[in-house]
Image: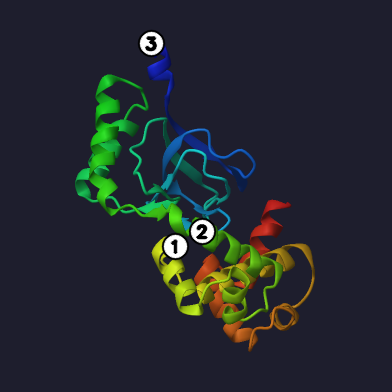
């Protein structure tokens, strides 16, 4: 790799929009690694089995080849802005891969990121700062063990195809015990199978809220929630928005 190719493997930019936008790549995956720090607005990034809700001031890591969708929304003043720090090389581990995830920056890490976004120029100085930042956050970052990938993927596929199934039915469908299924989900995704099933319900609920005029009670009943109040609680937990907020956002987008 010559110097030009090396420097071209980094991309430091600020992105601004005044309206909601969508992004990501579910087919071929992300072309490089990214740190994204949201300055104004809110965002939601979704893979097959992970959802990251991002608020102003928070930072997300998107790994290279990650297949995901992203939804970015302006704040109440119509501001949507984030720092995008792209880079090809990221340390890997033999027994797994790093996940799409929110990254907690301490004071030192924040100063390092600030030093990159002061100019957004790719220089030996800013590249060095970037990998200092990587070294600081890496020990706390989550990774997925390859040995459990197939089980979690099969379980999630089963849940999507049969959303009202019980967890014991999911375990039988994956040919593992229920206790093993819980262990796999804790190890790979740090959630329970039931929490993942709730997330899938919420994705289906969001589709119904944005594509139909069904009432919240009708959607809640269709998705087999015990009550509409419990449905609202779970929706807020996993999507960070109430049913009315989801519909209001879509109305704003369609103006």
Q: Which residue is mark 3?
A: 2
- Is disc 3 in contact with disc 2, using a CB cutoff of under 8 Å? no
Q: Can you identify the residue that label 2 sits on?
A: 50
**Any mark on residue 189, and which?**
1
Coordinates of residue 174 in the picture (x, y in percent) = 59, 69
Taking the spot 43% from the left edge, 50% from the top edge, the residue there is: 99
**Quadrant housing the N terminus:** top left
The disc, 2 or 1, on the residue closer to the chain's N-terminal end is: 2
- Which element carries disc 1, helix, strand or loop? helix
Task: Compute the Cα span from label 1 to label 3.
Answer: 39 Å
Disc 2 to disc 1, how far (Cα)? 8 Å
Does dot 3 land on a helix, a strand or a loop?
A: loop
- Which is closer to the viewer, label 2 or label 1? 1
**Residue that sits furthest to the front in the current view:** 175
Q: How many marks?
A: 3
**Which residue is drawn at the image coordinates 68% and 78% (left, top)?**
164
Name the residue: 29% across, 40% down: 134
Q: Earlier in the sequence, mark 3 or mark 2?
A: 3
Disc 2 to disc 1: CB gap under 8 Å? yes
Q: Looking at this rendering, what residue extends furthest in the right direction?
A: 213
- Closer to the chain start, of discs 1 and 3, is 3
Q: Is residue 71 left or right of residue 120?
A: right
Along the viewing direction, whichever of 252 and 98 lies nearer the viewer: 98
């Amino acid at each position: 790799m010559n110097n030009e190719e090396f420097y071209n493997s980094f991309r430091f930019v600020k992105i601004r929009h005044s309206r909601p936008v969508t992004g990501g790549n579910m087919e071929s995956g992300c072309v490089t690694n990214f740190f994204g720090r949201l300055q104004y607005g809110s965002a939601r990034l979704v893979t097959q089995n992970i959802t990251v809700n991002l608020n102003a001031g928070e930072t997300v890591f998107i790994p290279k080849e990650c297949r995901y969708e992203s939804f970015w929304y302006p704040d109440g003043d119509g501001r949507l802005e984030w720092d995008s720090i792209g880079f090809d090389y990221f340390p890997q581990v033999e027994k797994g891969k790093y996940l799409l995830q929110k990254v907690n920056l301490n004071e030192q890490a924040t100063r390092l990121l600030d030093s990159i976004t002061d100019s957004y120029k790719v220089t030996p100085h800013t590249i060095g700062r970037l990998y200092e930042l990587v070294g600081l956050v890496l020990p706390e970052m989550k990774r997925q063990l390859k040995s459990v990938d197939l089980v979690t993927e099969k379980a999630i596929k089963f849940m999507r195809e049969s959303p009202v199934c019980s967890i014991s039915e999911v375990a039988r469908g994956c040919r593992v015990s229920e206790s093993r299924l819980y262990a796999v989900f804790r190890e790979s995704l740090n959630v329970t199978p039931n929490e993942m099933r709730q997330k899938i319900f919420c994705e289906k609920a969001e589709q119904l809220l944005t594509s139909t005029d069904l009432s919240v009670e009708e959607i809640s009943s269709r998705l087999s929630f015990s009550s509409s109040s419990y449905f609202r609680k779970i929706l807020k937990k996993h999507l960070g928005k109430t049913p009315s907020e989801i519909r209001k956002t879509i109305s704003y987008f369609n103006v």
